[in-house]
Image (cartoon, rainbow, N blue to C red):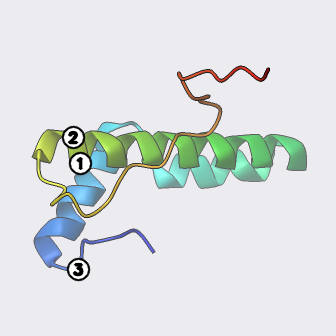
Amino acid sequence: MFGSGSTPEQRVARRERSQASGLDQRKIATLRREISVPDRSRLDSFIRDVREIERRLTIAASGDDGGARRLRRAPGIRSLSTTTSS
C-alpha cells in the first residue's frame, strides 16, 4: 500500500519521517472525532497530500529511483506546457 518499506529499518524511517512532519496520529484521531464529516474529508485529503509530498521528497533525496518509475503529478497541479487549438 505504501510502496517499498518492507524491512524494519525502512518502516522505522517512514515512521520517523511522519513524526518529523508533525503528523501525530493520536492528535489526528482526536481531531477527526471533533470535526464535521465534510471537515474530516478535507483533513484526510490534506494528510494524503502531505504524505505524497514526503514520499516525493524521499525519492528526490535518495537520488535513486532506478529510472523505473515516474512521479505522478500532484493533485491540483496543472501541466506547464500549454497547447493551443487552431
Residue 6 visible at all:
yes
Q: Label 1: few (<14), some or many (≥20) within 10 Å? A: few
Which residue is found at the position 19% from the left and 56% from the top?
Answer: 65
Say whether marks 3 and 1 touch (CB < 8 Å).
no
Q: Give the residue type that dot 1 points to.
A: Ile
The residues tagged by marks 2 and 1 sit, at their Cα atoms, a distance apart of 4 Å
Q: Earlier in the sequence, mark 2 or mark 3?
A: 3
User: Which residue carries the number 2 mark?
Assistant: 60
Q: Label 2: few (<14), some or many (≥20) within 10 Å? A: few
Which residue is found at the position 39% from the left and 49% from the top?
Answer: 71
Q: Position of residue 18 (x, y in %)?
A: 35, 48
Q: Give the residue type that dot 3 points to.
A: Ser
66 lies above or below 24: below
Name the mark on residue 59: 1
Q: Nearer the viewer, residue 83 or 51?
A: 83
Identify the element where label 2 is drawn. Answer: helix
The residues tagged by marks 3 and 1 sit, at their Cα atoms, a distance apart of 16 Å
Residue 36 visible at all:
no
Say whether marks 2 and 3 touch (CB < 8 Å).
no
Say whether marks 2 and 1 touch (CB < 8 Å).
yes
